[in-house]
Amino acid sequence: MMTQRVNGTVAVFGEALVDDFGDRQVIGGAPFNVARHLAALGQDALMLTRVGLDENGARMRAEFERFGLPMAGLQVDAALPTGRVRVERHGDGGHRFTILPHQAYDAIEAEPAMAAMTAAAPATLYFGTLAQREPASRDTLARLLAATDACRYLDLNVREGQVTERCVFASLHAADIVKVNEEELQDLFGWYTHMRLPTDDMACADVRHACATLLRVFNLTGLIVTLGPRGAVYFGADGAYHATPAPSAPVQLADTVGAGDAFSAVFLLGRARGWALDATLARANEFAGAVCGIVGAVPDDHAFYRPFIDRWEP
């Protein structure tokens, strides 16, 4: 049973795709994970994506319906297939991922996306980098960013071989708040501060100075760094530094798939609801940890969300 919605739509732009294991298909894509979490937690979300006229596209439409996401943001492509990542298992238990090129989410059209954005009038626009790898979707996102006064939240979410430094540079300039993991922060340090700093102590003067440089160079209001089991930190343009540790009672680990997406969803939920920053970070961390206790990025049962809704609602 879906919970009642709260005002302040979050628009989410990017890929909805299927991780194809051969014998099973798992619906994913970082933006789609974020949108589904937001909707399940009672926040209005507009997912802007494009799928194929195929079986996987039908799966995506069913997910839109299951989470109550508006169909205005869902485009259908008669030629290109629904996004797919081919996952090959290795004998040692590892996996090899191949992100297939020329998928429907690479061709998100501007006019219907603009119309859906205008109607929703979102307070926040979430975007990443994978859906910018080809010109059509990249140009559509640029138009959306230019036309909105919404807060721009960038989840860098770099995928090897899919994203160029030029795309990262442009995305950072377009953003207000940026979320990265430690590896991505190291990349940003190397590219834009010409330093390679250890990140085991995020409160040290050198790291704080380097993060302040990133905030200044890209005119950001906030930089979030997720640290896995060590929690997360937030650097503000005003010099603010907020750190939150991982939950004191971690769940039994199933996998870490989608933990960053879960964090982003609750961070955006907290901003929409006016939570204090420390509470927002702690709740985002808690929810990300809980997602690590299930297999996959999004639970099969909406009952998973109920305890969080009950504790977080005023």
Image (cartoon, grey):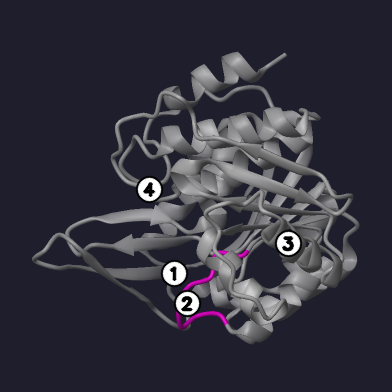
Q: Which mark is residue 103?
A: 2
Q: Amino acid at mark 2?
A: Gln
Q: Quadrant of the C terminus?
A: top right
Residue neighbourhood size for the residue with mark 3, other residues' Cα within 10 Å, grouped as few (<14), some (14–19), many (≥20):
many
What is the distance, in whole Å, between disc 4 and disc 1 at their CAs? Answer: 22 Å
Q: Label 3 belongs to which residue?
A: 211
Task: Tell me where the magenta segment starts and ends, as one range.
Answer: 156-163
Q: Specify which label sits upstream in the sequence, 2 or 1.
A: 1
Label 2 close to label 1 by CB (< 8 Å)? yes
In the image, residue 161 lies in the stretch drawn in magenta: yes
What is the distance, in whole Å, between disc 2 and disc 4 at their CAs? Answer: 25 Å
Vertical relation: 73 (above or below) 141: above
Query: Is residue 68 among the parts visible in the rendering?
Result: no
Q: Nearer the viewer, mark 1 or mark 3?
A: 3
Q: Specify which label sits upstream in the sequence, 2 or 4.
A: 2
Q: Specify which label sits upstream in the sequence, 1 or 3.
A: 1
Residue neighbourhood size for the residue with mark 4, other residues' Cα within 10 Å, grouped as few (<14), some (14–19), many (≥20):
some
In the displayed structure, does residue 140 sit left or right of residue 22? right
Q: Which mark is residue 256?
A: 4
Q: Which mark is residue 53?
A: none
Which secondary structure lies at badge 2?
loop
Q: Label 1 belongs to which residue?
A: 83
Q: Amino acid at mark 1?
A: Gly
Q: Nearer the viewer, mark 3 or mark 2?
A: 3
In the displayed structure, does residue 163 sit left or right of residue 237? left
Residue neighbourhood size for the residue with mark 2, other residues' Cα within 10 Å, grouped as few (<14), some (14–19), many (≥20):
many
Q: Quadrant of residue 54?
A: bottom left
What is the distance, in whole Å, between disc 2 and disc 1 at their CAs? Answer: 5 Å
Q: Specify which label sits upstream in the sequence, 3 or 2.
A: 2
Q: Residue at horizontal 34%, vertical 35%?
A: 293
